[in-house]
Image (cartoon, helix red, strand yellow):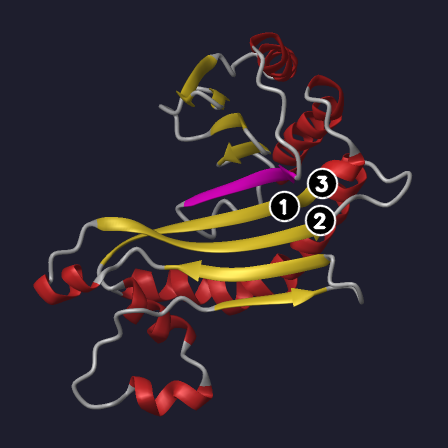
Amino acid sequence: MNPYSSLADDFYVNMNLSTEMELPSTRETVLHFFEQMQKQHPEMRNFYSRDKRDFVLEEDKDQGNYRWCNVEPKRVCSGFVNPETVETAIEQHRHALEIAPYALSISALDCEALDLLFGFDFSYRGNHNQLIAEALGVCPALDRLSNYPGTTIISNEPNITFALDEDCRLQCRLNIESRTNAYQIRTGEYQEEQLSVYVTARQYGSLATGQTYVETLDRLHEVSREIIDNYVIEAILEPLARTIALK
């Protein structure tokens, strides 16, 4: 069972591998990579191109939970929206990273960055920026400013990035993304849109000698779960959910 599914309206786990060099784009190479993904996940059968160098393979989206994978000129991505378990999504990303070095000729030297993103979306009709302030507060140094008479908060997207090693190669970022703009606030016309919380663990640069992409992903997974379980749930996700429920 997914321990995060009850914390937000939608939950997803994405993996992005960015490369320094451009990836092969021949028909045979791209199709071979996606065929290897499809062998592991037969329901991934919707294949299309968003442009000449951006190819996508995904499952049907009708049921609200689906896998996807894409290959861009300098990036390989894999994602799972509303997975039954976190481990199911991680296994998909492991498989993509197992076959990418062979199918797409990606060397451990060629890594610009490997990201593992945990996303939490809350559906809310209203001023996302004000909601974030009410649920989470603001920086103490800015608290009085945010309460200045007659003001309306039109931009409030907290984020923090911190390194987990001395070389600053292993990093984690927490950011909250609002979908509310000044026009909506001015007119009072809000659509039900997604307020997003992202937790991203990232490994920068070429991998160490003997280190694999799968091993690096497992480390990012460990870091992400520690941050989410020990901080993000109690301090970010639960307060947002409670505040939305009271609206």
Image: 190 above or below 139:
above
Q: Which residue is mark 2?
A: 220
Q: Kindly identify which numbered label has been placed on residue 111.
A: 3
| Image quadrant in which you'd find residue 161 | bottom right
Q: Nearer the viewer, residue 43 or 204?
A: 204
The image position of residue 173, as x and y in percent, is 58, 60
Q: Amino acid at mark 1?
A: Asp
Residue at figure coordinates x 71%, y 49% from the top left: 220
Image location of residue 214, percent across then percent down: 77, 35
Evaluate whether residue 55 shows in this view.
Answer: yes
- Label 3 sits on what residue type? Cys
Q: Which residue is mark 1?
A: 115
Which residue appears at 73% of the width and 28% of the height?
Answer: 106
Rounded to the nearest angstrom, the CA distance separating label 1 from label 3 is 11 Å
> Left of 78 or right of it: where is 175?
left
Q: 32 or 235: nearer the eye?
A: 32
Distance between mark 2 and mark 3 Cα atoms: 15 Å
Q: Is residue 1 magenta?
A: no
Q: Residue at x 48, y 44 (%)?
A: 11
Vertical side of 176 occupied by 43: above or below: above
Determine contact: label 1, label 3, CB under 8 Å.
Answer: no
